[in-house]
Amino acid sequence: MSRPGDAAAAAGRGKRFRSSGGGGGDAVTGGAGFLAGVACALLFALWKHAHGELLVPSALLSSEVSAEFNTSAAAVGQVRGSATAGTDARKAAQPVNFTGTKDWTSAVTAAAMAAADAVEHQIDVDSLPILFLSYGNAAYFNFVHNWAVSVQQIGAPYVIGSFDDAMLDLCANHSLPCVRAQFATADDFRTNFAAFRAMGAVLLVLEILERHPKLPLLVVSDSDTVWLRQPWTYFDQRPAADFFISTDCNSIEASAPCCGVQQLHLAQAQALALQMEDRWQPNNPLPSCGHIPGNWGFAFNTGLFAVRNRPASRRFLREWVDMLTDPAKEKDQHGRGVEDQLALNLLFDADGSMETHGTKRAGDDEPRTILVYNGTLRVQTLPVVLFSGGHVAFVQRTPWKHGMQPIVIHMTYQRWWSDGKRARLREFGLWHIDPPAYCGAGPGAPLKLLTYENGVAEFVEDVAKQRYPGAVEMPLFYKMWLAMTYQIAAFRDALAAARMLGRAVVLPTLWCWCDYDEGPDILQTCINPSADYAVPFRCPLDYMLDLEIIDWQQLNYRNAGFLDLPQVPASIRNSRAVVQIAGAKPADPFPRAASLVGDAVTVWPGISQADMQRVIQPVESVAVLELRGFVPGFLGTWTDAGQAAQFDEGWAWSMGEARWCCSSWGPHDEEYRTLNYAYPQLFKDGWQPWSAPMMKPPDWCDEVSEHGGNRRFTTLPQHPCKFLREPGDAAAGRGAG
């Protein structure tokens, strides 16, 4: 079995974790059709509107601005509704020929000007109070499409820059307003192709603003962002700022004050906003929050920014463009290649004052607005509770904890590239382009599901008490290892049972005791020091499984929370029966249907496929079977040995990268970078009851080098080389669990 190759997306796969995302996506280009693809999303939007979470423009804008906005949006909608939008874009902006050119800057400039011409061909920009812009290519079209649907739902006019002609064709097929923005390909440049593409993207922003002085605000976001609410009231309430930008700060404590209370409409959120206003103080040293006085590590993220059409903003954009193509500035003083995000961070601190003295507030009226770029640009850093990154939204779940909905989420801090991003969006009901059949709606075969309980919290605590019976607490990483071992085993049996029964398995909420990070210093406490959360915490599916492989295998599963989504018909949600896992095989394992108490049947540890199918038969017509009890190890043997072998082979692939990362840093000691969990035995090896395995120290503890501080990481409190070999820590070896 060979793994899939995806040359188009491979360039974005340099890291297991992405702290600042580009427009990641997958190469599957979604041929289900635009109307079918957004049907679930429209149902979701109606539900959110009914619950007051999706506001119409008139609810947030003055009547005058709202009327202007709606008129402009309607005009844009007419363009969007044209099935020839992509064809029109081709005619309006013929590609610039880069072949043989040596003046790459001029060539990219010409391409950006042609793209601006195409924007004018499609949209009456001068009539708009705001314009949204994103970019993408055919390999990332699904994320571009999802971004577009989310922007449509908040009622904003938008345009998409297409990096290739295949993307233009896809836009035409889905009636999306795209313009050719082909700032050459990797083959056209022998130097920094990424910098030239970024230069073209920024130059198009500048060109639109210079051509259309009546356009007040341009919002630029990566295609791996998703918009949940309208942002213009937030921007209107902060008139001093020339430029708005997101950050990779993960703490609302550091990122406060958060927001205008008019946006939240919740007493709890109002109280939080006022409380956080008082906390926006110096000397709260959190990494990646250096835009706030007293913190350190500037992490402005160009995946989401908004530009007011002012001279100061346009001046900055011009120098940003120039820096991206200046050969003398191709690398910074630390030898790092200068791409768009690093260039912006360097320009913001052009005189070095931010690094040496911290940020400077622009004034007391807008405390979040700081002076950058030699004091000439007023920048408002967007609060992470409303303009959230992936860790804040999907790991900490901070906005929802405080009773509010973010305005936008950027898919940063995730694992497994586009597959991990898509899984997180699906779990939160934000992947808008699945066909109705995915939700169980529309014609076709009925959707049948198998859910299962996740008793991991009780399991971990029981084992911890057995193995650490005294006052010493079981290390958090040991708990994490046990938790993932349990949850992987439960998923394996539930997945196999669902396949035997012809159903899709619905995962439960997963729980973690130790966070993931590219920096091994996470093993100091198992918690990101710049975040606001505690253990255990609900964690996304990409923390447990390699979703790139899982989705490549096309496993039939649904994410946690699937049945809570409003897209799922009530006929599925309300059709349920319980499948109880007993401690042993009952005396009467196959009772007649008439003797069943309610809609419930019983299975037992080691049950065979044939027996399970016979047990389930009385409730087989039910849409949702709820598997309750101790799931790991409950499933015994398959009827068909060939099917068992096929499942085992796929499972072995699925477990290839299902491990914790990262315990080493840099190019050295890669073989010591991940820590394996314990995996359930294969079906071909027969059945035996599942019990908690014993964690053992890695056999490489004394082989780790000093490079990158890797030897030091093995001495951190949550590293198994430390806590499993510590003198006097014999309690770690007690009990069988």
Image: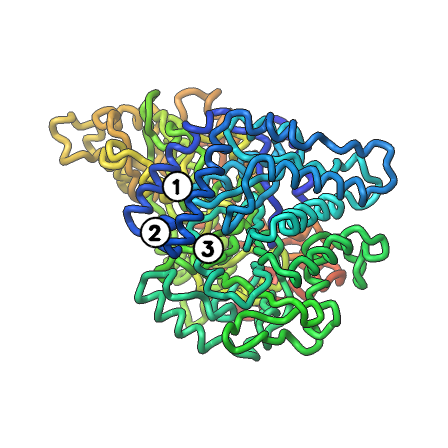
Give the left or right position of residue 64, taking residue 677 as reference: left
Please give the residue where the numbered disc 3 appears in the rendered image.
231
Residue 377 percent location from the top left of the image: 65, 67
Q: Nearer the viewer, residue 335 or 180?
A: 180
| Residue drawn at point x = 74 percent, y = 72 percent | 352
Indicate the secondary structure of the residue bearing disc 3. Answer: loop
Circle 2 residue: 53
Q: Is residue 458 left or right of residue 537?
A: left
On the question of residue 9 being in view, the answer is no
CA gap, disc 2 and disc 1: 26 Å
Kind of residue indicated by mark 1? Leu
Question: Which amino acid type is shown beneath numbered disc 2?
Answer: Glu
Name which residue lies at 44% across and 39% down: 74
Find numbered disc 1 in the image and state the secondary structure of the residue it sits on. Answer: loop
Q: Are marks 3 and 2 in contact (CB under 8 Å)?
A: no
Location of residue 590 (image quadrant)? top left
- Give above or below for 688 relative to 382: above
How are the colours assigned in the image?
rainbow
Q: Residues within 10 Å of mark 1 (few under 14, many from 20)?
A: many
Name the quarter where the C terminus is drawn.
Answer: bottom left
Q: In what quadrant of the picture does the N terminus appear?
A: top right
**Residue 172 visible in rendering:** yes
Mark 2 secondary-structure assignment: loop
Q: Residue at x 51, y 25 (%)?
A: 83
* Residue type indicated by callout 3: Pro
Distance of label 1 from label 3 (alpha carbons): 33 Å
Of badges 1 and 3, nearer the viewer stands: 3
Sequence-wise, the earlier of marks 1 and 3 is 3
Residue lying at 22% horizontally and 28% vertically, measured from the top left: 619
- The residue that disc 1 covers is 507
Specify whether 73 is left or right of 221: left
